[in-house]
Amino acid sequence: MAFYRYHLFICANQRDDGSQCCAMFGARKAGEYLKNKAKEAGIHGPDGVRINRAGCLGRCDDGPALVIYPDEVWYTYVDNEDLDQIFNDHLVAGKVVERLRLRTGREG
Ligand code: FES
């Protein structure tokens, strides 16, 4: 059994050269928002979900970006409603949110 049911990495990278980065879109707050939701729901931690802030995930032009493992599903988001849907549908119910999915070209 996996240590975490889901491990979510959310890019919070900030660039100082003005080029697009996830921090431009409120990614740090978004990560805290998701982590707090998981804690409030009592599912943050082993056997539950882990929310980690990450450096650049290499999807800068598609961002803000996050990825959920072990499913390896990438998402983008605009606001807390999008984050709520990713949380409720994917992390809680195990269903992919197609409307927010970032394509990798390798989906089945
Ligand atoms: S800055 Fe977020 S994916 Fe690169």
Image: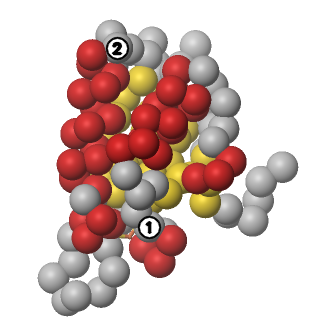
Q: Position of residue 92 (x, y in %)?
A: 52, 21
What is the three-letter code of the residue carrying label 1? Gly
Q: Residues within 10 Å of mark 1 (few under 14, many from 20)?
A: many
Residue 41 in view (yes/no)? yes
Residue on which the image places disc 2: 41
Q: Is residue 32 above or below residue 12?
A: above
- The kind of secondary structure element at disc 2 is loop
* Spot occupied by residue 52 in the image (x, y as percentages of width and height): 31, 40
- Residue 91 is marked as none
Residue 84: image x %, image y %? 43, 35
Residue found at x 51% / y 38% = 86
Q: Secondary structure at mark 1?
A: loop
Q: Which amino acid does the dot numbered 2 rest on?
A: Ala
Specify few, some or many for label 2: CA neighbours under 10 Å numbering under 14, 14-19, or 20 or more: few
Looking at the rendered structure, which numbered label has been put on residue 63? Answer: 1
Quadrant hosting ligand 1: bottom left
Q: Is residue 24 left or right of residue 62?
A: left
Of residues 32 and 108, the one drawn nearer to the viewer in this rendering: 32
Q: Is mark 1 within 8 Å of ligand 1?
A: yes
**Residue 34 in the image, given as x and y percentages of width and height:** 32, 35
The residue drawn where x is 21% and y is 48% is: 29
Q: Is residue 61 above or below residue 55?
A: below
Position of 18 compared to 45: left or right? Answer: left
